Image: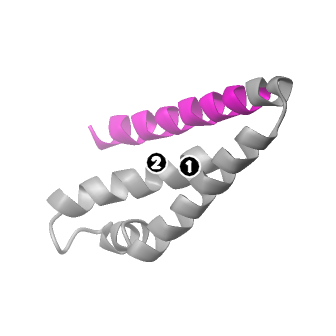
Amino acid sequence: LLPCFWIYAQVATELKKTSPPKSPYQEWITFYASSGYKTDVDKMIDLTNRLFKETHEKEKVRMKKAFMSASKLELSFWDDAFMLKK
């Protein structure tokens, strides 16, 4: 789940810089760009990094694959959303 949390925070932070104040997505942007949400994402990143360091090599390979798969799914989600906008 980490890529989802992380990417939402990044996307919202970027949208916050360019989105008009009356955007229909303002509530979404405000929540995912908030310092509280970013704090939670940072905690998840730290936890994931700690668990990664503490596990054996075979599990590290599985963790990397899972992270990459989830990241690719997130990219696909955003690509689909972008294509709907066109």
Answer left or right for 19 relative to 33: left
- Image coordinates of residue 11 in percent, x first then y, are 36, 51
Seen in the picture, residue 62 relative to 77 is either above or below; the reply is above
**CA separation in Å, label 1 and label 2:** 5 Å
Answer left or right for 66 relative to 5: right
Q: Residue at x 41, y 33 (%)?
A: 79
Q: Quadrant of residue 28?
A: bottom left
Q: How is the image coloured?
A: one colour
**Residue 59: mark:** none
For mark 1, give the secondary structure: helix
Kindly identify which residue carries mark 2.
7
Classified by dominant secondary structure, the portion drawn in magenta counts as helix
Q: Residue at x 24, y 63 (%)?
A: 16
Segment colored magenta: 62-86
Q: For the residue carrying disc 2, how many other residues have a C-alpha within 10 Å: few (<14), some (14-19), or many (20+)?
A: some
Answer left or right for 19 relative to 76: left
For mark 2, give the secondary structure: helix
Quarter of the image for the C terminus: give it. top left
Q: Nearer the viewer, residue 47 or 29?
A: 47
Seen in the picture, residue 34 relative to 18 is either above or below; the reply is below
Kindly identify which residue carries mark 1.
4
Type of the residue with mark 1: Cys
Q: Quadrant of residue 21?
A: bottom left
- Image coordinates of residue 42 in percent, x first then y, are 52, 60
13 magenta-colored: no
Residue situated furthest front in the rendering: 54
Residues tagged 1 and 2 counted as in contact (Cβ below 8 A): yes
- Image coordinates of residue 22 in percent, x first then y, are 19, 74
- Image coordinates of residue 7 in percent, x first then y, are 46, 48
Q: For the residue carrying disc 1, how many other residues have a C-alpha within 10 Å: few (<14), some (14-19), or many (20+)?
A: some
Q: Residue at x 59, y 63 (%)?
A: 43
Q: Nearer the viewer, residue 18 or 37?
A: 37
